[in-house]
Amino acid sequence: EHPWFLGSRSSRSDPKADWYIWHDPVGSTPDDPQGQPPNNWQSCFDGPAWTYLPERGQYYYHYFMRQQPDLNWNNPDVRQAVWHAVRFWLDMGVDGFRLDALGTIFEDPAMTPHDVPMNLVQLRHMTDTAQTPAERKEIERYWFDMFKNQWGGPGLHDLMKELRGILDEYPGDRLLVGEDDNIDYMGNGDDELHLVFNFPLMRTDRLTPPHIRANQAARLQKLDSLPVRGWACNTLGNHDCSRLITRYGDRQHDEQLARLHLALLLSLRGTPFLYNGEEIGMTDLLICEPAQLRDTMATWYFERMTRELGVEPEHAAQRAAAMSRDKNRTPFQWSPAPNAGFCPQTVSPWLPINPDYLEGSNLQDQQGDPNSLFQFYRHLIRVRQGSPALMTGEYEPIHPSAKKYLAYLRSAPSQKVLVVLNFSPRRLILDLPDLHARPARVLFSAGCTTQEEPARLRIEPYGFVWTELT
């Protein structure tokens, strides 16, 4: 419905005719002018990536929904129009931009078809029903092969350099963060994006010291090897995946783990990103009534499962609820009032409200409780902001073979901080004789006490300590 696209679809001679990606049908005839799409590329949301429009007698390309046609970034007029919009917001004073699905801007110019022996709904169903590690590995390869020709086409780095050049014209700190984990999009460290997400950190069923340690070693090494040293960017959740407690909790120590995981995120080297609602302990809500789903991937999947694959509607609804991103996008829970204070009682919100808002998972109740998760978030963030070592210091792992706990140093010229996090359900008593420095001041601890000896710590299950060293 955008004016640009309305012009482009109206005629092949319109001034914006080439602002999107159009292709002639394959094998069209007077009796069948629609023919076939130019290749078998898929939309990651709802089946074929090509939609036919009789006004032009052509197909247009969309990596996402058919309502989201892809711009033709090879057209210099398109670039100038988008850069004009960028300057508008920078002139308004914004601090920068988050670039969603960065890698989809350019496709393979040869339009090479994929060779996966199934369509998107079949692959998604295969993913749902996989049982063995071998099946899951094969499915992972299929997902990559299905979309590899629609990602990372030539020209993306030059485009990012253009965008970075525009931001660098403006005074003060301006930020570009890409929703991608490829450090290559940071260029030489000073000419493309400022940040890309460390998504490999969160790609695990359970956060463990060996996983975190290996992730940091690999990630920081790549950032350090850039011509201009890169800065890290860590997160454990976002709008596309299950909420923190649902994903990494154990249903017995959920809040303890939530606090431990925050202590991890705020003490690693780099910029932490938090997802709204995790500070009050919001959890996933499975929406098993298909009519209440809003995520187009889920509504499309339910319809295709029942119509094409013959899956029983009740089972299909459960599968759609589980894969939908709606479960972690329910309205923020402000208070114990009707609709969690998100909207008046007489109004139906876009998505259902998670009923746990009546059990303390709401902002109003937690603001008045000094021991709440919300107050814990506020306090821990303040401690981090007051610590030069935790904000900008170097990262140095210690005790690299420990499996139950994670220990590392964060060191800045004016401060050194020891971080110890107990990821086990048992109390740990740790000797740290290899530290030449000694604890001087505890910045924050949860379930941790210092024994008589300065370098001995007792840490309760899922406890942690940040302590300044001298």
Image (cartoon, grey):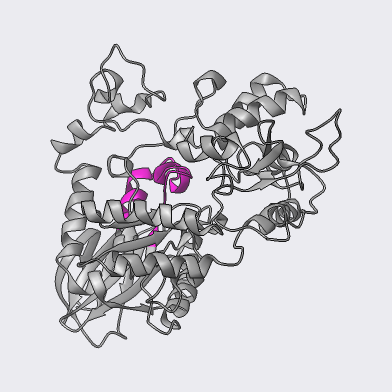
Q: Is residue 35 above or below residue 404?
A: above
Decide if residue 221 is on the left or right side of residue 364. Answer: right
Decide if residue 64 is on the left or right side of residue 452. Answer: right
Q: Is residue 299 above or below residue 238?
A: above
Nearer to the camera, 114 or 144: 114
| Residue that extends furthest to the top in the rendered view of this protein | 346
| Residue that extends furthest to the front in the rendered view of this protein | 13
Q: Residue at x 84, y 30 (%)?
A: 32
Q: Residue 198 falls in which quadrant of the image?
A: bottom left
Q: Residue at x 69, y 58 (%)?
A: 149
Nearer to the camera, 228 or 239: 228
Quadrant placement of the C terminus: bottom left
* Residue 468 seen in the figure: yes
Q: Is residue 41 above or below residue 349?
A: below
Residue 306 place in picture, x, y as percent: 71, 23
Residue 94 place in picture, x, y as percent: 25, 54
* Residue 128 seen in the figure: no
Nearer to the camera, 68 or 436: 68
- Whether 384 is among the magenta residues is no
- Whether 239 is among the magenta residues is yes
Residue 236 place in picture, x, y as percent: 41, 54
Q: How many marks?
A: 0
Decide if residue 108 is on the left or right side of residue 277. Answer: right
Q: Which range of residues does the magenta coloring cover?
A: 234-262
Q: Residue at x 44, y 41 (%)?
A: 246
Q: Residue 277 falls in which quadrant of the image?
A: top left
Q: Residue at x 34, y 27 (%)?
A: 356
Q: Is residue 288 above or below residue 156?
A: above
